[in-house]
Amino acid sequence: MRFMVLVPGSPESEAGEMPSTDLLEEMTKYNEELVKAGVMLSGDGLAPTSRGARVRFSGGERTVIDGPFTEAKEIVSGYWIWECASREEAIEWLKRAPFDGGTEIELREIFGAEEFDEAMTPELRERQDQMREQVEQRG
């Protein structure tokens, strides 16, 4: 099972402040544990929303909204992609993350193609498989 772990933004991350060396050391140590255990597939920090954009879709109209975005509770400042045997295993790994201060980290299972079985025709499945192979070859 794959999971996305969403790290919320903060006023500091939105201001473009980088984490302290101590926090980077703790996070690097934690990430090394995830990698050694075969859990971590990917993970990165994200730039502040002032460097981002949103696109609103309304019928055929597309509206670009430049950051920064004011709803801080909806801001994501980083993420991981993990491979775990179960939701419980992913939660156990997340509980070991070096966060404090009331931070809430969101864990979401990533759908695989099998979750779309009824709507996924053989042709669509083949196209999805081809795209996945192309992406893996680039990685």
Image: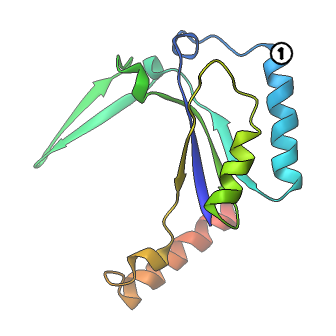
Q: Position of residue 32 (x, y in %)?
A: 87, 43
Could you tell me which residue is drawn at 74 percent across and 48 percent down?
93
How crowded pointer 1 is (Cα within 10 Å; few <14, some 14-19, many 20+) is rated as: few
Residue 133 versus residue 110: which sits nearer the camera? 110
Relative to 76, is 38 on the left or the right? right
Q: Give percent across and percent down for residue 12.
A: 58, 10
Q: Is residue 136 above or below residue 55?
A: below
Vertical comparison of 96 with 119: above or below:
above
Q: Which residue is mark 1?
A: 21
Screen quadrant of the N terminus: bottom right
- Residue 97 horizontal/vertical position (percent): 74, 36
Is 122 placed above or below 20 here? below
Q: Residue at x 40, y 90 (%)?
A: 122
User: Is residue 139 visible in this depiction of the protein?
Assistant: no
Q: Amino acid at mark 1?
A: Thr
Give the residue at x 54% y 9%: 15
Image quadrant where residue 75 sits: top left
Q: Secondary structure at mark 1?
A: helix
User: How far across and down, in percent of the image, does residue 43 sit?
Assistant: 68, 43
Most distant residue in the bottom direction: 122
Image quarter of the C terminus: bottom right
Report whether 66 appears left or right of 22. left
Q: Is residue 50 left or right of residue 66?
A: right
Q: How many marks?
A: 1
For image coordinates 88% across by 35% down, the residue present is 29
Q: Is residue 136 visible?
A: yes
Q: Is residue 28 left or right of residue 72?
A: right
Observer-nearest of 35 and 135: 35
Viewer-nearest residue: 43 or 86: 86
Seen from this angle, which residue lies furthest left?
59
